[in-house]
Amino acid sequence: MSERKHIRLGVNVLASGRHDAAWKTLANPAALSTDIDEFVKIAKVAERGLIDALFLADGPGGLVAEAYSRPWRALDPLTLHAALSQITQHIGLVVTTTTLFGHPYTVARQIASLDHISKGRAAWNIITSQAPVAQAAYGIDHAFGQNERYQRAEEFARIVTGFWDSFPNEAVIADAKRNIFVDKQQLRPIDVQGSHFRSAGVLSTPVSPQGRPVIFQAGQSEDSKAFGARWADALFTGQRILENGQKFYADVKALARGYGRDPDQLLVMPGLFPILGSTEAEANRRKDELDEQLDHEGLRRELARHLALQPDDLPFDQPLPYAKINTAEPNVPIASRWHRREILNEARLRNWTVRQAVRGNLVGGHRVIVGTPEQVAKDIIHWFDHRAADGFNLNIDVQTSGLEDVVDHLIPELQKAGRYRHEYEGTTLRENLGLDHYDAARASTHTLPDTDQPSRSTESATADA
C-alpha cells in the first residue's frame, strides 16, 4: 500500500451534468446555465460529501460549438464562486481564467479577493487555450504560436503571484499615534517588465488566508507539463489508461523536483467520469439510456475530425479503421493530437467499435468508468496506489442525481477503505488538499528567473486540455 493515504476529489461543475444528453432527462433545462439555485444545490451536495473543490471550467469569448446542442457555461466563474462562497463553509472554489488575454493585475486582485471573501478557499485554474471565439471577443486577429503562448503565460503568472505576495499582513500596523495604517517599509512591490505584460506596484489586497491562493493548471503537452510543474499546486489532466497516467505523474513530479520543489506539494488529479449503479448491470443501463439520446451523427463527425478522416470512413458498428488512421496522422491539427492519441489508446485497449468510441466521452475527453460504488472505488484506489494520480476531478453524468450517488455510495466505500476523510481537515483549501501554507518570505520556488527553467521539449504533438 502506498504511504499516501487520502485521495483528493474535485467536481467539474456543469448545471446539467457532464453527459451531453443529461439535459434531455431534466424537467426544466432551459434555465440551467444561469439558475443560481441549481449551482447552490450542487455545492451543498458536494460539501456534504466532503469534496475538496468545485471546479468551474471556462473559456473566454462567446458561444462555443457545444452551446448550440446542450446547456453551456454562461456565468462568469469568479462571480458565481463569490456567490457560492456565502452558502458553503469548507469546499474549495476553483476559478478558471486565461493567461493570454486581459491583464494579470485584474486576475490577481479578483482571485485574492475571492480568497478573503471565502476565508481561504479560492484557487486559480490557469489555461492557455485560444479558441477563435476568444480571439474575436478580445479583438485579436491572430493566434499565438506555442512558444509565445507559454512566454505570455510565464509573464502573466509571475505578475499574478508577485502581486499576491506584495502586501504582507504584518504591513498593516494601524498605529494611531504615528498616523500610520500601512507600513510602507514592509511591502514587497513588484516591477515586471516583460515582452508581453508589464506591471509594477503593490496589490491593494493583503496576503490571503492561505498565504497564496491554490494554483491549478490543466494540460498535457511538454510545455504545459513544465509550466505546471513550476507554477501549479495541482494539475488537472486527462489520461485514460493507467500506464499513461503513471508516465505523466512521474514526469511532472520529476520536473517539480528539478525546480527545487517538494514533489508531494504538486498534486496530480486526472479527470474521471464515473457512472454508478447498485449493480454493474444497473450502471450500464444508466449509461446506455443516456447514450441512446446522444447525437450520434454529430459525434461521428467530431471523431472524424480528431482522426482526420471523413464520417463515411467510420461505419458505426465496425472496428476503427486503424490503417486509414495511421495514414492520416500527419494531417491532424496540433490541438487535436493529444485528445486523438488518448482516444485511440483506449479504443485499442478495449477493442472499441466506432459506436463505442463516440459513446466514450468523446467531447469531455476524460476516462469513463461504469460500475458499482465498490468497483469504482477499487479502480480509484488502484490508480492512486500505482502512482498515476493523487486524486481525481470528477465529471458527473447528471446533476444532482449522479453527484448524490458519488456522495452517498462511492465516497463511503473510499472511507471504509481508509482512503478518504471523515471530516474536513481545516478551514482553507490548502489544508484540505494536504498542501503547506504558502509563506512568501521562505519560498523561492516560483521566483526563479526564466533562464532557470528545466529544458522543455520543442515537440508540440500534444495539446492543452
Image (tube, rainbow, N blue to C red):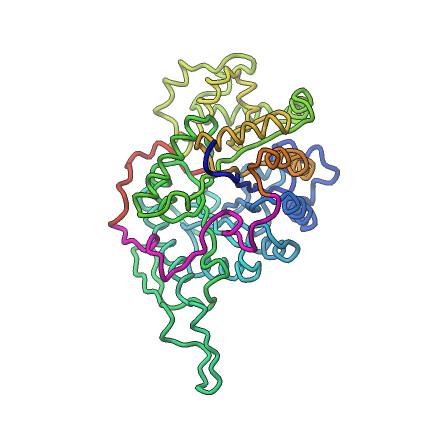
Q: Residue at x 35, y 57 (%)?
A: 197
Secondary structure that dominates the magenta span: loop
Q: Who is closer to the viewer here, 430 or 446?
A: 430
Up-down: is 317 above or below 70? above
Residue drawn 51% across the image and 32% down it: 366
* Magenta region includes residue 264: no
Residue for point 39% across, 47% down: 141
Tell me, yes or no, if residue 427 can be seen here: yes
When the figure is inspected, residue 370 is found, relative to residue 221, above or below; the finding is above
Q: Residue 71, position in %: x, y?
A: 63, 40
Residue 437 lies in the magenta-colored region: yes
Query: Which of the two residues, 121 or 314, is positioned nearer the viewer here?
Result: 121
Identity of the residue furthest to the bottom in this view: 177
Instruction: Please provide percent x and percent y for residue 424.
Output: 59, 49
Residue numbers of the magenta segment: 422-451
Q: Please tell me which residue lies in front, 132 or 171.
A: 171
Residue 117 placed where, x, y %? 57, 61
Residue at x 52%, y 17% (from the top left corner)? 352
**79 shown above or below 73:** below
Q: How far from the left and from the top, in percent, is residue 361?
A: 55, 28
